[in-house]
Image: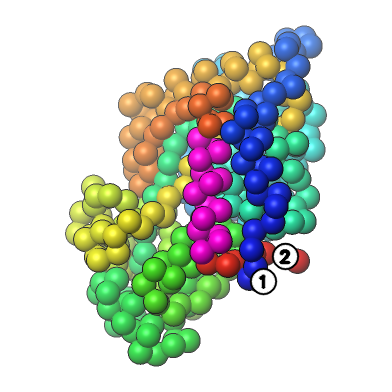
Amino acid sequence: MKRCACSARTGLLQAMLAAGLLAAALPAMSQGAWPARPIRLIVPFPAGGALDTVGRVTAQALAERLDTSVVVENRGGASGAIGVNEAARAAPDGHTLVFASSDTLTILPLLRRNLPFDPVRDLAPVAKVADSYLMFAVHPSVPVNSIRELIELSKAKPGSLRYATPGNGTVHHMSFEYFNLLTGAQISQVPFNGGGPATAAVIGGHVEVLITGFNVFKSVLAGQLRGLAVAKPTRSTLMPAVPSMAESGVADYRASSWFGVFGPAGLPNDIALRVGRELVAIAATPEFQQKVTAVGGDAGGLPRDEFVRFLAAESRYWQKIIEATHIRLDD
């Protein structure tokens, strides 16, 4: 991991997003009946994390609405880049989509120059479906019961605390580094290949601190993890005893991720619009909202054009964070 300024390519990405060129140049119509076979929905992280959970709920609902099979395939690795690249290289016929997040398609392109795909050139946004908030937790053996105590312990014993993430360049990684910057905490990252392995490492006592989605709430309630704070404006109904970050004394701190669907560049316009309409409709259903809430997220559908504008705003936000923390990933 190197620390330097963001590349000039960042500005180009933002400009293209803002101009809506991610959705441009799509073929107007598909050739033949669609879907003609089961649809692959690639989840670019291993099973067990919030992205995988919401992706599977989305796939099931989309299958019902399209009256076809939607098969989830986990393709983890390289902070999501492997799975996204597979989707980007697939035939743009509407039978391969990717359920991605801000980790891989907003943050990672700002951190790495050598990605195997270009999010502007190689992918077509379809729709956003949800947002996921993060929380801070520790193994029960760590002698802290609050965020303030965590900060104080890290300063008193530098190098004694480490935090587990789903990988370098994820929203978890960047959000925790921003937390370190804001609070002066001295906690170092241990990256894993997905949220499931990261959580298992902390529950097993191999790493002390975890930044994760709310899908671990059962482990918190069971005493396998001690929740310190949730990074959302209010407390979570899943863990009402865990305070918000603002209550914990860290104001104006955000740690959240969006979840959305993309296809390969060249995805026919009629298919992109059809899938987008269905996804936005799914996000508005009480059943979907309940299932997303159960893992600590908020359902929030955005059609393609609004999603493109949202992506531009997200890119600007994360660029500021990256510039403030001076983090860059280059292999």
Residue at 36% over, 28% down: 287
Residue range corresponding to the magenta coloring: 310-324
Is residue 285 at all visible to an observer of this figure? yes
Q: Which residue is mark 1?
A: 2
Tell me the crowding category of disc 2: few under 14, some 14 to 19, or many 20 or more residues within 10 angstroms, Cα based.
Answer: few
Alpha carbons under labels 1 and 2: distance apart: 7 Å
Label 1 close to label 2 by CB (< 8 Å): yes
Dominant secondary structure of the magenta stretch?
A: helix
Tell me the crowding category of disc 1: few under 14, some 14 to 19, or many 20 or more residues within 10 angstroms, Cα based.
Answer: few
User: Residue 192 at what x, y percent from top left?
Assistant: 58, 66
| Mark toward the start of the polypeptide (1 vs 2) | 1
Q: Judging from the image, what secondary structure is the residue with disc 2 in?
A: loop
Residue 104 vertical position relative to residue 2 in the rendered view, above or below: above
Residue at 50% over, 77% down: 188
User: Residue 46 at what x, y percent from top left?
Assistant: 59, 53
Q: Among all residues in the image, which is located at the extreme bottom?
A: 157
Residue 63 on the magenta span: no
Q: Splitting the image into 4 quarters, where does residue 111 fall? A: bottom right
Foreground pick, 94 / 264: 264
User: Residue 63 at what x, y percent from top left?
Assistant: 56, 23
Residue 311 on the magenta span: yes
Q: Is residue 118 left or right of residue 217?
A: right
Residue at 80% over, 29% down: 91
**Amino acid type, residue under disc 2 in the picture:** Asp
Q: Quadrant of the N terminus?
A: bottom right
Q: Is residue 245 left or right of residue 43?
A: left
Q: Which residue is mark 2?
A: 330
Circle number at residue 90: none
Residue at 50% over, 58% down: 321
